[in-house]
Image (spheres, rainbow, N blue to C red):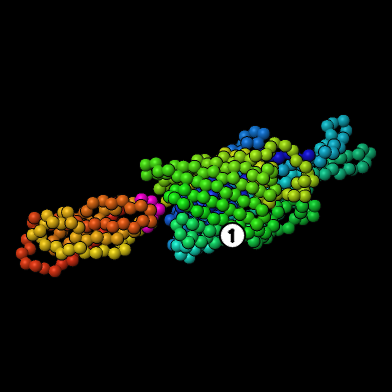
Amino acid sequence: MLSIVSGSGQTSFGLNGVYGITNESFTSLNSFEYNISNYSVIKDWGFSFTYGGEFASSVTSNLYQVTAAKTFGSHFISLRYTPGYQKEFIFKSGEAIPYNNTEPITLESKFQYKEPFGLGYSYSVNKEFSIGLNLRYFKQDFTNESVTAIFSDTIYFVRETELDNSDLWKTDIGVVWKPSERLTFNLGSINLITFGSEITTEDNSDFEIRTEKAVFAGINYSPVNDLNLHLSLETNNSFLGGMSYLFDFNKNKIGFSVSAFHDKEQEPFIAGIIPAAVFTSKYLDLSLTYIKYFSDRNNSGSYYDFKENGISNIINNKYSYDKLLLTTNIKLNTLVEQRVKFLGVEINQNIYPALNDKYLDNPIATAQVVNLTNERIDVKPVMVINGISEEKLQSHIISILPYDTSEVNYYAVISESYAGVNPEITYANFYLLTVNDDFDD
């Protein structure tokens, strides 16, 4: 007989609820399962926490993971601590050994699987290519009970416990290619390199985590802004696909994500669905995710079936329970970031102080400006004309959409105190201001 102690753990599709390679922080934080290359959209520091409950025979709650990540130029490093990534199975032998006139002794075997932590690294080659890897540590503990008979004037039965354990390390590599802002390809390995300590008891080797090698391939397509379609395929005959959409909400975004998945080890063909509610802002992202399996998860299983098939993922297997999870991502930026950039400035006309009124309606210069970020930016054009204006001359504010290019006009106001009577050669400095009064370009 097999009974399952309610635990918490990892799924092959992660716990964020927002999958694939997107511009949201869920891509970079706590995403080793579907972002094998550790691709990052984090500009400086990122932190992630996932807390939730599992709906077994009783509801249990746990802190699933804590992630810290940092970007150093083109390099990105993340560390994930996962106290809740674990699962325990208890097998009862079905044999009862009588002991004097007391209750019979029933023997048990326990198999516990954990993933304590993982590390990730990626290198951004350019705007189109990123390569990286992750290293994850697993711990397996096996406990088996047996009874030894001691013969003397009286027969004694002694319960003995045999402990066995194994450490497992897994390393995978991946690459992300973005031929355009709307299309992304993601390719990675599954169980490329595995190594660790060996099980000392041969019988327990049948219960180790399965580590068959496979290849992961993903595609993300965004036909319009804020709509993301994703599909992930594995050569072990598993896949996950879905969509997400975000709506503007003041300067933030709210939306939803929904995905369905197939696992060759689970029934039915579509094993479950994963809807999520999403909130994103400049510094904080939230996702409330529900993992729903379509088969009955409250039945006992067979010892021999478990021995024959085992598990390849700690939590996303046919013994997994439904879950409700809240993920909180915090993004901190301590760097001075250039948000807009000049592509060129064209001088439209010469400046004649006597024709001051003319420059109120007709720009003296027009600049081509590109938004370097994934958010809409309000730009203040500012100009200083040497020898004519001592103060900054500000023109009309203009909004530029994410990654868009726009024309920005510069208008001049000549001070009445200007006393120049003879023609002179001078020059003008053109600036762009974004959120504050610090020059951005």
All told, the count of numbered labels is: 1
Look at the picture and state if 347 lies above or below 279. Answer: below
Tell me, yes or no, whether the highlighted magenta stretch contains residue 375: yes
Q: Find disc 1 in the rendering and name its residue.
A: 188
- Is 213 situated left or right of 341 in this image? right
Q: Which residue is drawn at the image coordinates 54% and 62% (left, top)?
A: 175
Q: Main secondary structure of the magenta part?
A: loop
Q: Which residue is drawn at the image coordinates 68% and 51% (left, top)?
A: 312
- Is 386 situated left or right of 1 in this image? left
Q: Which residue is drawn at the image coordinates 16% and 54% (left, top)?
A: 360
| Part of the protein shown in magenta | 372-376
**Rendering coords of residue 399 (x, y %):** 31, 51
Mark 1 Cα shell of 10 Å, populated few (<14), some (14-19), many (≥20): many
- Is 27 situated left or right of 96 in this image? left
Indicate the secondary structure of the residue bearing disc 1: strand
Residue 432 position by quadrant: bottom left
Look at the picture and state if 399 lies above or below 326. Answer: below
Tell me, yes or no, whether the highlighted magenta stretch contains residue 257: no
- Residue flagged by tag 1: what amino acid is it? Gly
